Image (cartoon, rainbow, N blue to C red):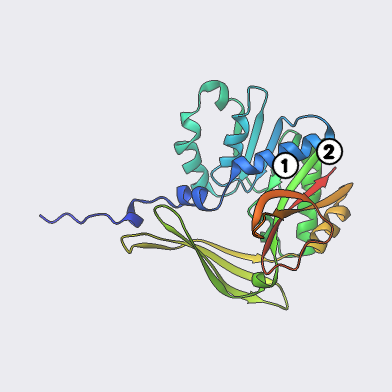
Amino acid sequence: MNIKKLSLADKANIHDLYERSVQNVEHEIEFMQETYQQLKTKSAYSYREDFCGTANSSYEWIKQGDDYDAIGVDNDESVLFWAKNNRLMHLPDKEFQRIKIIEADVMTVKSFPVDILSAFNFSYFVFDSREQLCLYFKRSLATLKSDGIFFLDLFGGPEAHQELIEKTEHDDFTYIWHQSKFHPLSNFIECSISYDFPDGSIIEDAFIYKWRLWSAPEIKELLLEAGFERVTFYWEGEDDEGEGNGEFLPNNEGEPDLAWIIYIVAEK
């Protein structure tokens, strides 16, 4: 009897691969805490993660200490099921009590007010009209405490308007980012993530995104229109070789780079 040997792609899990190739939640939480402390002269303790996926950020947030609480919100039942069975169920009771995962639409969900709300990995690009995005921002404002802060990220630059494929090598797989469509008159962009393995196997289109690529001025205008008091862009600095150094500082102009990613900080 011949038993077919599983390929590396067969053995891999897309949610685990996504966390390893896309997310850096430790850096995000450090940036959010440091920025909150600089702006509010105190620490943030309550956190909500919209479009949370595997709730990796919420999980990392509560690891800061016994006074930290987190809420993760997503409407994808399958990814939340993975998060609960591969992460939350292994938490000690005292930590499990401080994290709540909600399967719901971010436009209708209700939760307790928080110090910090985030919508990272360009997840809010699903809103493709000014009306929709402004309404989401208004709901975001309402879920924050009186001195709360909303954190987002944004990518742009000429390469963001191109159809292209970018590959990033990791220890045991290759991450493939494919911008397969871009419509300049509507800023519609279709992207996907695939994973290639050393044995030649591949997970094609593990994740597919159909978004509107928003610009920085549009996002700032809509956040202010929604009622946020102040909106600040944080641009990444450079090292001696001109590469990003991981330090993001306030910047009102940016640089004409081919591709860039920034943080957006909106204060209530």
Residue 241 picture location, percent across and down: 64, 59
Circle 2 residue: 39
Residue 251 appears left or right of 213 = right
Query: In the rendered structure, which amino acid carries the disc numbered 1?
Result: Leu
**Is residue 103 shown to the viewer in this render?**
no
Q: Which dot marks residue 117? A: 1
Q: Considering the image in quadrants, where does the C terminus appear?
A: top right
Location of the N terminus by quadrant is bottom left
**How many residues crowd mark 1 within 10 Å: few (<14), some (14–19), many (20+)?**
many
Q: Are marks 2 and 1 in contact (CB under 8 Å)?
A: no
Question: Which residue occupies the foreground of this view, 59 or 101?
Answer: 59
How far from the left and from the top, in percent, is residue 220? 83, 57
- Nearest the viewer among 82 and 119 is 119
Q: Amino acid at mark 2?
A: Leu
The 10 Å Cα crowd at callout 2, few under 14, some 14 to 19, many 20 or more, is: few
Determine whether the residue tagged by mark 2 lies in a helix, strand or loop.
helix
Q: Secondary structure at mark 1?
A: strand
Coordinates of residue 50 in the picture (x, y in percent): 66, 46
